[in-house]
Every structure is written in structure tokens, then in C-alpha cells.
Image (tube, rainbow, N blue to C red):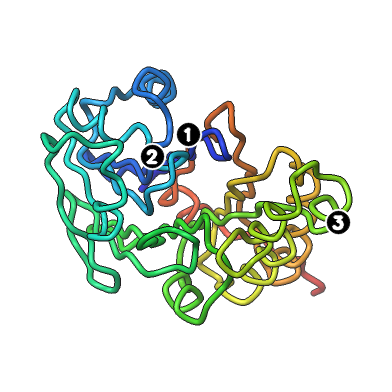
């Protein structure tokens, strides 16, 4: 199983997940042209995609879904509430399948398990993608609102995690130029996770099998790459995390992460005192 966050932030979000010949996008917040450009870095084209899975209807996650589905014949998967709220991006000619939170569905060699989140959208979900052949698991949870018992349950025992670290609390309240209403919405339980909340979530759900973490959906006004990384790296390393840590950017894809290669790499040698 391999994955790359093609871009993440208020300008667009999309994550490529691959297992053998199965390639899916989780969210499609970029134009078809931009999606094509970013997919090309993984030597893929939109027509190679097996499906697009939408977590919710907000434009930075869904604006490219309809045109990609129509132009390239890509099936869409989303909850019923997201479908009703996404009509502005759809024309009715798309092939749409329903996701049901808590119920697993198969897409090629991947099993997709969506679960409900608290973001301020019609029917939002996060997803866990599992490789049917290897059992490798990738959790993708952006626009999380706040960490819930359900989110912690589903995200445990993943080999890879894409988790939002949207804002630094000091920057949000002290430096960001957002109006007060926007700041309150971001910090609410239906908004976005702060760096500190992301660190707490990762600390709680960490397991020895976790080998890759990507921090996503960083605010351009209320966060920096260095602050997000600094907030989570210490707690993760103290837990025993020895994997790769990336911070997703809005403009460029993250390096591809091969979860099978990370799982199979030799463990660090232990010093001998004999």
C-alpha cells in the first residue's frame, strides 16, 4: 500500500491511495487540470483512478469531483448527506455509490471503512483504507472538529495516518487576521484540530505498528510547518515512534510513502553492554 497527499489546505485537498492496480483519491478539491498535474508526479492520470471517495461537500474537498467523474469515468463514493449537499458540483451523469458510516465497502483491492466526524458539514466522515492482501491500514482524518471516542477507535492500529494539524492556538488568537467569527468557527468542536489537539490524538492512538504520519490541512495564516512538526514530533518520539513524519503542503504533493517497505525494514539495532 502506498499513499501521497497531493495537496492539503484551504485551496484544495486530495490524497492518493494505491494498492496494486487500485488507485483512489480521498477527496478531490483541485481542478481536473491541477489534479492531473499532481497525479503525474506518481506516474498516473485521472483515468487510472478506480474511485473518488469524498469525506464531505466543502469546496476544498469536493470541487473537482464532478468534472473528474464525468470526464474520466471515475465512480464517486460518498454518504447520502454529502451527495445531497454536493449538487453544485454534480450534473446527475456521474456514477455515485453510497458510503455508510461504520460499514465497510470494497473498492478493488482496498477495503474502505468510513466513520462519522463532527465537522460543520452535512454528513462528514473520515476513512480508514485497508489493503486486502497485506492488512496494512491507512487512516485519513482531516476536518476532524475534535477527537471523539469513535475517531480514536477507528484510527487505532493504523500503519499510516493523515491527520489534520490545522492551527497553532497562539497564532490563531494572537496573529491571524481572520474575523472573530471565523476564529471561533475554526476553534469550535465542529471546526479544525489545533497542533496541540493533533499531538494529543496521536499520543493516544499510537501503536507500535504506526510507521508514517502526515500532518495535513495547515492554515496558511494561523500555522507554520515548523510549529506543527514541533508540536507532534516530541510526543510521538517519546512514545517510541521511529517512522517518517511529513507535513503536507498546499502547493506540492508529499513524497510517496510505501507502507509495506516501512513495515518490512529492519528494526534499529539495540546497543549491547555485554
67 and 229: which one is in front? 67
The x and y percentages for residue 140 are 45, 56
Spatial CA distance of label 1 from label 2 is 7 Å
Q: Which circle's residue, 1 or 3, is located before the other in the chain?
A: 1
Q: Is residue 104 left or right of residue 243?
A: left
Disc sitting over residue 170 in the figure: 3
Residue, disc 2: 16
At x 69%, y 55%, the residue is 181
Badge 3: how crowded within 10 Å, few (<14), some, or many (20+)? few
Residue 127 visible in rendering? no
Proximity of marks 1 and 2: CB atoms separated by less than 8 Å: yes
Residue, disc 1: 6
Q: In the figure, residue 22 lies in which quadrant?
A: top left
Relative to 67, say whether 126 is above or below.
Answer: below
The x and y percentages for residue 65 are 30, 36
Q: Which circle's residue, 2 or 3, is located before the other in the chain?
A: 2
At x 49%, y 62%, the residue is 119
11 and 52: which one is in front? 11
Spatial CA distance of label 1 from label 3 is 28 Å
Amino acid at each position: 500500500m502506498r499513499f501521497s497527499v497531493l495537496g492539503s489546505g484551504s485551496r484544495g485537498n486530495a490524497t492518493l491511495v494505491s494498492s496494486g492496480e487500485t488507485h483512489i483519491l480521498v477527496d478531490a478539491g483541485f481542478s481536473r487540470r491541477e489534479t492531473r498535474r499532481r497525479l503525474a508526479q506518481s506516474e498516473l492520470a485521472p483515468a487510472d483512478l478506480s474511485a473518488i471517495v469524498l469525506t464531505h461537500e466543502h469546496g476544498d474537498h469536493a470541487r473537482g469531483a464532478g468534472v473528474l467523474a464525468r470526464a474520466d469515468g471515475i465512480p464517486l463514493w460518498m454518504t447520502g448527506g454529502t451527495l445531497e449537499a454536493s449538487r453544485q458540483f454534480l450534473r446527475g451523469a456521474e456514477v455515485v455509490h453510497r458510503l455508510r458510516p461504520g460499514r465497510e465497502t470494497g473498492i478493488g483491492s482496498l477495503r474502505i471503512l468510513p466513520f462519522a466526524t463532527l465537522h460543520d458539514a452535512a454528513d462528514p466522515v473520515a476513512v480508514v483504507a485497508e489493503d486486502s492482501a497485506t492488512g496494512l491500514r491507512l487512516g485519513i482524518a482531516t476536518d476532524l472538529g475534535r477527537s471523539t471516542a469513535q475517531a480514536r477507535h477507528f484510527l487505532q492500529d493504523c500503519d499510516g495516518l493523515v491527520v489534520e494539524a490545522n492551527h497553532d492556538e497562539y497564532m490563531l488568537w494572537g496573529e491571524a487576521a481572520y474575523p472573530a467569527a471565523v476564529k471561533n468557527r475554526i476553534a469550535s468542536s465542529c471546526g479544525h484540530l489545533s497542533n496541540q489537539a493533533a499531538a494529543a490524538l496521536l499520543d493516544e492512538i499510537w501503536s507500535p505498528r504506526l510507521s508514517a504520519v502526515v500532518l495535513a490541512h495547515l492554515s496558511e495564516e494561523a500555522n507554520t510547518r515548523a510549529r506543527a512538526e514541533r508540536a507532534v514530533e516530541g510526543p510521538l518520539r517519546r512514545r517510541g515512534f521511529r517512522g517518517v513524519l511529513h507535513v503536507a503542503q498546499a502547493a506540492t504533493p508529499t513524497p510517496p510513502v510505501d507502507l509495506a517497505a516501512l513495515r518490512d525494514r529492519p528494526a534499529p539495532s539495540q546497543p549491547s553492554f555485554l
